[in-house]
Image (spheres, rainbow, N blue to C red):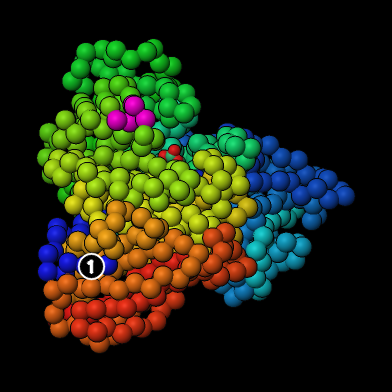
């Protein structure tokens, strides 16, 4: 293998490896966003999701969901408890997100709004309990009055519980109203109020991601337009954000999670802040005026004011707010002002009021998630034009649809290239062999014009959409092989992200996923470590690589890519074969190399190896050293392995 150190190529894009975040598989509520109370404001369509009355022998309390004199017009449903005989049966329990994970000694901020009606109710007792109903912490809120008031306390858990719950008991008889119940860990990422779950953010930060794409995924589009993600509804006072049914709530491949809502506690402000916290460029993806084409295909009309005549598209069902394309375009323009505008601007002021007067420095926006066909282009064109007219430097990510090999996909890509779209977002979910066979996908791609954003990809061990898919080493090593092709074509491929990112072990809809977690713990899959090895060894300059005998990509199942990283030389090698393979790497033209290098390797003879909560480190990168002889490295690649060789050069 020859690495032409003396013939450096283009610079490696800074954002080559990044993250795709979508609220799927309980990735936000119940995952990254650590609020422990589900449906805290009783505002979901079925207002008692997550709550249940305590049913003891006495059964002496009744309840209703009331709207009489609510806390606010947007938060206008609350729980009204009527207690005839005082006792432990008079109360309600919140189940959390498949339980509440709490840690011994950790502190949780409890808050709720309450008021009393007729009767003698003077206080509420709130207890955090373990799976067996044993109290872990308790507090009493006294002095309830006839006016809504916020009560707060800090609960310190006396023991650890994976699936705890929160119980609210009414002391006395009569009526009590309860709303906006929150139990939020104090231990969040950077100790932020309304901050994120630290172990999950740490896994992300460790990857040194170039960008964070959010909020999806299909939830950008919604099943219908009513169900689309509207960023303006995701900012401001957390308690006032209206929940919405999650697009992944519906039955999907026999996985049904009817209790799946988006609380928007993790909203656009938090996404921007998270991007900043982990050093990633924010990449928001906005709805282009189309609901998911796998679902309703509902379309917003293209009006003349948006730069076109009336839509030639088929008739559409109107969303409740009946938005035209202009609404969507305006949302994008306002988002740029929210992210970057001065504090004196209307949207910049909202950002400042949330605690971030400095701009977020947004540079890229995606128009449409995974859309295709003429309906997409008809909306994309005026959308992109309007965005560029106001913000000429804003880079736009466009969509070419879900399949890399279909006719519609090719047509969309062609048109987008004619339009000089900056980035074309390609999505590929396919069998592991597709990834190994398509390493050369971008070798003959035009070197000028639109760049590629491989915005979603993952090898599927069984079949696309199968619930049997696993994050096996076979999938991960095949992705590693494919990524040699991305990196060798980094002059064309500017960004890439594995998808989906997160999954809760008890509440997933889609497999495979990069990081899995329960209510307390998390682990990276082999796919995670492959991504991390690429991202943390991204390098600065592309270096040409020749495989033995000038072989093409992956002949004999050997795949390679190389970069310079400042003065270091980094070679990535995939050996997709069950036997070990000795290789000689010639670092042609390199000067002043050290006598040893550092190898980071993942390998497993069994391609079906997976990590799990019980064996989180079963397959993870291992480090070792190797000898460097002048410009020559002799190294034996392990069977079924992905290896990164790093040699330090003269500084
Ligand atoms: O990653 C899961 C889904 O796959 C995304 O929501 C969508 O964009 C794609 O179809």
Instruction: Please check the rendered image and state whether residue 167 is part of the magenta-colored stretch, yes or no.
Output: no
Q: Nearer the viewer, residue 409 or 123?
A: 409
Q: Quadrant of the N terminus?
A: bottom left
Residue 21 vs 605, above or below: the answer is above
Residue under the point 17% across and 49% down = 342
- Residue 509 visible to an observer of this rendering: no
Residue 61 vs 506, above or below: the answer is above
Residue 501: x %, y % from top left? 45, 53
- Residue that numbered label 1 is attached to: 2
Dividing the image into four quarters, tell me where ligand 1 lies. top left
Direction from residue 149 to residue 237 in the image, left or right: left
Residue span colored magenta: 406-410
Direction from residue 290 to residue 349 in the image, left or right: left
Q: Nearer the viewer, residue 406 or 616?
A: 406
Q: Quadrant of the C terminus?
A: bottom left
Mark 1 residue crowding within 10 angstroms, few (<14) / some (14–19) / many (20+)? some
Residue 526 vs 47, above or below: the answer is below
| Residue 609 in which image quadrant | bottom right
Residue under the point 29% across and 63% down = 548
Direction from residue 555 to residue 356 in the image, left or right: left
Direction from residue 61 to residue 564 in the image, left or right: left
| Residue 465 in which image quadrant | top right
Magenta highlight: main SS: helix
Residue under the point 22% across and 28% down = 415
| Residue 404 in which image quadrant | top left
Q: Nearer the viewer, residue 226 or 58?
A: 226
Element class at badge 1: strand
For this orientation, the residue located farthest to the front is 549
Residue under the point 37% across and 30% down = 406
Residue 412: x %, y % from top left? 28, 29
Residue 185: x %, y % from top left? 52, 64
For this orientation, the residue located farthest to the bottom is 595
């Amino acid at each position: 293998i020859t690495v032409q150190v003396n013939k450096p190529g283009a610079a490696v894009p800074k954002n080559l490896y990044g993250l795709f975040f979508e609220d799927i598989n309980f990735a936000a509520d119940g995952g990254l966003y650590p609020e422990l109370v589900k449906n805290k404001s009783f505002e979901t369509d079925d207002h008692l999701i997550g709550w249940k009355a305590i049913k003891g022998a006495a059964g002496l309390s009744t309840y209703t969901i009331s709207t009489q004199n609510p806390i606010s017009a947007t938060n206008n449903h609350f729980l009204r408890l009527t207690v005839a005989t005082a006792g432990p049966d008079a109360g309600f329990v919140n189940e959390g997100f498949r339980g509440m994970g709490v840690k011994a000694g950790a502190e949780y901020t409890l808050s709720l709004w309450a008021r009393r009606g007729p009767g003698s109710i003077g206080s509420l007792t709130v207890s955090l309990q373990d799976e067996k109903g044993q109290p872990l912490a308790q507090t009493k809120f006294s002095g309830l009055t006839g006016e809504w008031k916020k009560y707060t306390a800090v609960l310190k858990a006396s023991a650890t519980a994976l699936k705890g719950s929160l119980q609210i008991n009414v002391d006395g008889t009569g009526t009590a109203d309860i709303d906006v119940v929150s139990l939020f860990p104090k231990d969040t990422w950077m100790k932020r109020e309304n901050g994120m779950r630290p172990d999950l953010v740490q896994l992300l930060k460790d990857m040194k991601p170039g960008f964070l794409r959010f909020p999806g995924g299909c939830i950008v589009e919604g099943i219908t337009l009513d169900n689309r993600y509207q960023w303006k509804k995701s900012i401001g006072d957390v308690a006032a954000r209206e929940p919405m049914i999650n697009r992944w709530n519906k039955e999907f491949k026999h996985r049904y999670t009817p209790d799946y809502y988006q609380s928007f506690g993790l909203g656009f402000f938090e996404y921007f802040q998270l991007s900043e916290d982990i050093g990633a460029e924010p990449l928001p993806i906005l709805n282009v005026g189309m609901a998911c084409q796998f679902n309703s295909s509902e379309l917003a009309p293209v009006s003349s004011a948006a730069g076109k005549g009336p839509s030639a598209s088929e008739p559409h069902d109107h969303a409740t707010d009946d938005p035209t394309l202009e609404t969507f375009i305006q949302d994008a323009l306002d988002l740029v002002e929210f992210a970057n505008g001065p504090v004196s601007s209307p949207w910049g002021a909202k950002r400042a009021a949330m605690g971030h007067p400095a701009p977020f420095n947004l540079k890229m926006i995606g128009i449409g998630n995974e859309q295709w066909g003429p309906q997409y282009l008809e909306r994309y064109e005026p959308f992109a034009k309007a965005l560029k007219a106001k913000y000429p430097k804003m880079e736009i990510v466009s969509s070419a649809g879900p399949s890399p090999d279909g006719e519609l996909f090719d047509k969309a890509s062609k048109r987008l290239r004619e339009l000089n779209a900056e980035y074309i977002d390609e999505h590929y979910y396919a069998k592991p062999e597709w990834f190994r066979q398509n390493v050369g996908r971008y070798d003959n791609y035009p070197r000028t014009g639109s760049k590629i954003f491989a915005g979603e990809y993952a090898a599927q061990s069984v079949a696309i959409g199968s619930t049997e898919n696993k994050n096996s080493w076979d999938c991960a090593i095949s992705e590693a092989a494919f990524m040699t092709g991305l990196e060798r074509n980094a002059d064309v491929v500017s960004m890439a992200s594995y998808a989906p990112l997160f999954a809760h072990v008890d509440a997933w809809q889609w497999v495979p996923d990069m990081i899995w977690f329960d209510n307390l713990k998390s682990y990276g899959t082999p796919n995670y470590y492959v991504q991390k090895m690429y991202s943390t060894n991204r390098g600065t300059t592309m270096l040409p690589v020749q495989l033995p005998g000038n072989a093409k990509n992956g002949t004999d199942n050997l795949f390679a890519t190389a970069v310079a990283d400042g003065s270091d030389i980094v070679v990535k090698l995939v050996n997709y074969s069950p036997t070990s393979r000795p290789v000689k790497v010639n670092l042609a033209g390199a000067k002043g190399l050290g006598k040893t290098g550092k190898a980071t390797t993942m390998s497993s003879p069994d391609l079906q190896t997976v990590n799990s909560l019980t064996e989180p480190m079963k397959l993870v990168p291992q480090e070792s050293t190797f000898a460097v002889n002048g410009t020559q490295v002799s190294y034996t690649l392990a069977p079924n392995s992905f290896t990164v060789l790093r040699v330090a050069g003269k500084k």
